[in-house]
Image: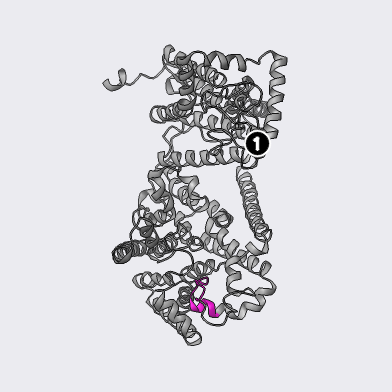
Amino acid sequence: MDDRAGGRRGVANVEHGGRAGEAFGDPEESARAGMRIARVALWGLAALLALRQVLAVLGTPEADRLTALETWVGPDGVLHVTGSLYDSTRFTGTPFAGLVLKPLTRAAEQALGWGWTFGTLLLLVALGVSAARALPGPVSRRTSLLAAPVAISLLMLSLPVRNTLHLGQTSIIPVLLVLLGCLTVRDQRAAGALIGLAAALQPTVLLFVPLLWWTGRRRAAAWTGGAFAACTALAWAAMPHDSATYWVHHMAGAGLGGAADGIANQSLHGALLRLGLSGPPEIVLYLALGAAVAVLGLRRAVRYARDGQFLLAIAVTGCVAVVVSPTAWQHQLLWVLLAAVGRVGRRASDRYMWPVAVVLVMSLPAKAMLPSIAALLPLRDNLVLLAALAAATVVPFLPRSSPHYAHPVPTEYADPVPARFRHVPLLRLPGRVLTRPNLLLELLLIRVTYAGYSQVRLAATGGSNSAGRATAEHHGEQILSAERFLHLDIEHWANHAVVKVDWLRHFFDYYYESLHFVVPLAVLGVLYWRRPVDYRWARTSLGFATLLALVGFWLYPLAPPRLMPGLGIIDTVHGAQDFAKPDYGTLTHLTNQYAAMPSLHFGWALWCGLVIAVLAPRWWMKALGLLHPLFTVSAIIGTGNHWVLDAVGGAAVVVAGLGLSYVLQGPRARTARAAAVAAGRPSPPRAPEPESARG
């Protein structure tokens, strides 16, 4: 009797309280299966990225492929030219690098593409595996299993690696030799020989000598210096004129290659030149600042090495090398990416800030990180240098002795709210996060997302407005026909009615131009500061809506009414248009004018109105919030910038974004008072408000 009753209770629990798989499955076996799937997926991603890089290199015309390698060992390369390697200043490597590459000339001519590209990829895999195995403990089993494919994928995506594969550079080799010498090879003489060989290829690697010396590996430090001296002497004996040119006349390669004040040179010397300094004052300041960075950075590296974080110590030393080098070209900046292994922040939610920032800086062009504002151009032009400088001198990496190193302050979660549907949410998360996310990380992601949004808008018409003009105007005719069928074609009437009233025209022009970004950012800012839980819900739904809108821009480029020839719409915001020109309009050189369907002007305004209506505590606040989408739809139609159906599309993506947020993450979290009332319990007492908040 008891067994049957217990069985019935078990079946009832399965039906009403959870999934059958959770009742009968083994949680440990499910976790292991999930781990295997994750590993296969990540290794598959790494393989796809490698294949993409190979296809990108081999798909490039031969005249533009592996240009750096071609200038060295190609049929007309500098290694074939009689005389000095540095006569043309195209060869920027050390004399030892030229000596090593000289015997490879014939082989490189025969298999310049495939051999060099696949060899570089193999070196890249070795570098990623070495870095993953050197992560400082304690490291969870999940991290140790997934670290290698993640590291390889991030390396594949980074600009230094992409630049290396495209140009045919050798900059991965010194980094790999240093990692092998410092982390893998136990014999100090062999380790020192590897690092010395790396220094012969990239002289700033000699900064690892004091790191080895002060961390007790003095024999390795001595062998590093000896191997470097031997390789350099060998090159000097074989090519004395070239060695004198490189080491004496060009100060270890300074002045070879591109202009030292170019943006591609992300060293301290290049930054000072870009700031307008030159001559002896610049050299003195560069030497003084470089010495200060070297002393401070190496002291930090020694401290982290003694703390057991030797991979971080290598990264910090490499960042010092980037800063103090006379020239640090893009393919030589891989050291900065290794600094992502450092742990920064006491809270678990802050741990993502530093690695995400490093990965984005090393993977995206600088214009995607900072907008084109004159005051920010010095920062944007030196973004990688600033990242290297920060890692070398100021970023507060946690020591392993810190109680927050292995156990950060945990994230607080709200109790999950029961959903109306059985399988909602699809993502089984612990719950809605109660604490505020890292502000710098949020701003960074917002900026990168907006940069991607702008690029997709522009790419939707082939990179220019003229490329998609015919298609966009054809779609405009379709929308106009549909509106006439539905009796919604009010654009011409509304536009001319607004034009006749000056104050109304100026009001709608201002509303269209000024509040599109201001109001959503203000809503997000208030929620971030006052209601972090609702901020995450609102931000996620807005992100989904914007992503869906980008799909609409890509699939259905649409000319707005003001850009439809023969319609008679007056462009009140941008002025008169010359339809005889392929590209026309005041803003056509800035953004895609055919990204009209759906209207994000109305979509974002509707999102603001709905969020305010749901969360505002007073009825008049809710009413003011709902007025914003009403004014916005009037502005976009009255100024001739959107069709009525564009607004319908904007509303559709907002509703879909809210729906996706609900399906994936479940209902938004309730406050303790609301949850108690819903459960029929007495609500907790309200905490007294400070005087500043009562108003």
Residue 284 drawn in magenta: no
**Scheme of image coloration:** one colour
Name the amino acid, label 1: Trp
Secondary structure under the numbered disc 1 in the rendered image: helix
Residue assigned mark 1? 554
Q: Around disc 1, counting alpha carbons within 10 Å, would you say few (fewer than 14), some (14 to 19), or many (20 or more)?
A: some
Span colored in magenta: 86-99
Question: Residue placed farthest to the left in the image?
Answer: 691
Residue 94 in view, yes or no: yes
Give residue 687's position: percent from left, percent from top.
33, 21
Asked if 255 appears above or below 400 in the picture, the reply is below
Asked if 689 appears above or below 229 in the picture, the reply is above
Q: Nearer the viewer, residue 340 or 643?
A: 643
Give residue 321's position: percent from left, percent from top.
40, 65
Identity of the residue drawn at 55% across and 27% down: 576
Q: Nearer the viewer, residue 396 or 296?
A: 296
Report the side of 168 relative to 234 (left or right).
right
Identity of the residue drawn at 41% across and 54% down: 382
Give residue 659's position: percent from left, percent from top.
60, 26
Residue 96 drawn in magenta: yes
Asked if 325 appears above or below 45 in the picture, the reply is below
From the image, which quarter does the N terminus lie in? top right
From the image, which quarter does the C terminus lie in? top left
Give residue 100's position: percent from left, percent from top.
55, 79
Identity of the residue drawn at 55% across and 18% down: 638
Image-quadrant location for residue 248:
bottom left
